[in-house]
Image: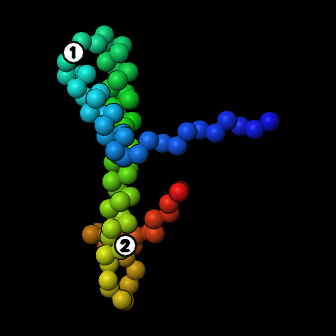
Amino acid sequence: MKKPVAPPPPSFEQSLAELETIVDALEKGEMSLEESLSSFERGIGLTRACQHALDAAEQRVRILTDTRPDAGPRSESGAELEPFESND
């Protein structure tokens, strides 16, 4: 028996658009407390997903723009950056 395939996670743009919708709805103040808490929880998850996507993009840019021939790519703190592994 096959396991059900989970849908792919939403793109950064989709997550950001949903987050903006949630913020607008929360600012209106027309939801019940339970609805507000549920929306807030979803918003936190979307915020974390967006931040993760931005961090991964930043790491890819740093790897691509590091032109030092003597060393591997490094972060501002001097730690060596690891190559980005895409799940695509």
Instruction: Judge left or right: residue 75 versus residue 8.
Output: left
Helix, strand or loop at label 1? It is loop
Of pointers 1 and 2, the one earlier in the residue sequence:
1
Task: Kindly identify which residue carries mark 2.
Answer: 63
Helix, strand or loop at label 2? It is helix
Instruction: Name the residue rendered at 36%, 74% in the picture.
Output: 64
Instruction: Name the residue rendered at 31%, 37% in the picture.
Output: 17
Instruction: Name the residue rendered at 34%, 56% in the picture.
Output: 55
The residue furthest bottom is 70
Q: Position of residue 85 (x, y in %)?
A: 50, 63
Which quadrant holds the N terminus? top right
Tell me the amino acid under the disc marked 2.
Ile
Residue 20: which quarter of the image?
top left
Total numbered labels placed on residues in the image? 2
Gap in angstroms between the C-alphas marked 1 and 2: 44 Å
In the depicted structure, whether residue 73 falls above or below residue 45: below
Residue 4 appears anywhere in the view: yes
Q: Position of residue 24 (x, y in %)?
A: 22, 26
- Who is closer to the viewer here, 6 or 70? 6
Task: Kindly identify which residue carries mark 1.
Answer: 29
